[in-house]
Image: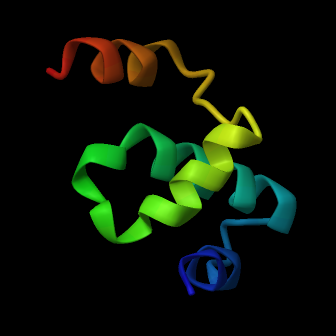
Amino acid sequence: MALQAFTINLLVQHRSKAKQVLDELLVADEKYLPQFKEKINELKIQRVSSKDPVVIDLMKNGH
């Protein structure tokens, strides 16, 4: 459902990019999204992670 919400936004031009962003957000915000634990574990197995240095810093330092 979250991916569908992303893709109906007129600013999102590519479904694949929307999926990538959503996947990275889920992994980055794992501690706040316990209801997505199974999906996040699948993404981690697929080695999904954020490439954004700001997000990486926030994940490491929790600021």
Query: How is the rendered protein coloured?
Result: rainbow
Report x, y in % for residue 17.
78, 53
Q: Quadrant of the N terminus?
A: bottom right
Which sits in the foreground, 12 or 3? 3
State the residue at coordinates (68%, 77%).
10
Q: Is residue 63 above or below residue 14?
A: above
Q: Is residue 21 above or below residue 47?
A: below
Report x, y in % for residue 50.
58, 29
Report x, y in % for residue 51.
62, 21
Report x, y in % for residue 25.
49, 48
Which sits in the foreground, 55 or 40? 40
State the residue at coordinates (26%, 45%).
31
Left or right: 22 with respect to 12?
left
Outermost residue to the left: 63
State the residue at coordinates (66%, 54%).
42
Q: Indicate the quadrant where residue 29 lies.
A: top left
> Can residue 14 be seen by looking at this rendering?
no
State the residue at coordinates (31%, 60%).
33
Which sits in the foreground, 3 or 9? 3
Q: Quadrant of the C terminus?
A: top left
Number of numbered callouts drawn = 0
Q: Is residue 45 above or below residue 56?
A: below
Left or right: 10 with respect to 58?
right
